[in-house]
Image (cartoon, rainbow, N blue to C red):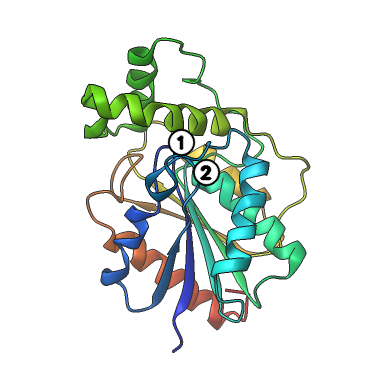
Amino acid sequence: MEKIQLICLPFAGGGASIFNEWQPQTMQFDIYGVQLPGREKRFVETPYTCVHEAAQHVVELLIKDTDKTKLTVIFGHSLGAVLAFEVTRLVEQQQLYPNVSLVVSGSPDPWTPRSSRASDEVDDDSFVEKVQAFSGFTHTALEEPMMRELLLPTLRADVQMHEDYRPQNKTPVQSPILVLRGDVDELVSKYDVQQWQHASSERVVFSELSGGHMYFMDDIQPLLAELSDFVKDAMMLGEEV
């Protein structure tokens, strides 16, 4: 079977490299990690603070860099989930790929405002503590003063982008959705993720994996297995993939 194109949108503070590291662990997917401004090879560029502007930019990258003939899955975790939702809307409008499926992870649905905010914290230490408390994940680079100074502007922009996000309308996407959550995620509840049922006019499937908010950081295989099963089921049902 031809490989399926897996487009991955970053979580807050993340870059494309984490997704590119997944490639050796899967034979089913061709992985394209989206590199947003403000990180890794694009470190000197100004990061976005608006999901809608970032989504437009991502689609420009996809038009330039991806295969328009392949079955395509768009994946995003946390901030990446709502960004992936908006990118899917734009991709559908432009009919960029023959078949598209959306996979969202660790995020409330687009219409649920974020109940807690970290971006309002002026003090850097308080901001980092709150972000780490929300995510249940500690980035070791933030513990080093020089690295923290370099990374904080992009992390702040990402967190603001996520917390300020509001959809422009209530129109659902027309692609099937797989919704994922860590079973002990203290940031995003089971109720939160179940509200994604309203985000698509097609099938919406829910699944929990072992772990907290950043459940896939220790072992990516359970996530890749869920993606594979979802794609196979979609193909059997004759859905877009």
Q: Is residue 15 above or below residue 224?
A: above
- Residue 197, percent from left and from top: 62, 51
- Could you say which disc has been placed on residue 189 in the image? 1
**Which quarter shows the N terminus?**
bottom left
At a point 46% along the width and 13% down the height, the residue shown is 121
- Residue 24, percent from left and from top: 26, 71
**Which quarter shows the C terminus?**
bottom right
To which quarter of the image does residue 62 belong?
A: bottom right
Q: Check disc 1: other Cα within 10 Å, few if <14, some if 14-19, many if 20+.
A: some
Q: Amino acid at mark 2?
A: Val
Q: Is residue 174 above or below residue 196?
A: below
Label 2 sits on residue: 193
- Residue 105, percent from left and from top: 46, 49
Q: CA distance from mark 1 to mark 2?
A: 7 Å
Q: Are marks 1 and 2 in contact (CB under 8 Å)?
A: yes
Q: Amino acid at mark 1?
A: Ser
- Residue 86, percent from left and from top: 65, 50
Between residue 44 and residue 17, name the one nearer to us: 44
Q: Is residue 153 above or below residue 225?
A: above
At a point 35% along the width and 21% down the height, the residue shown is 128
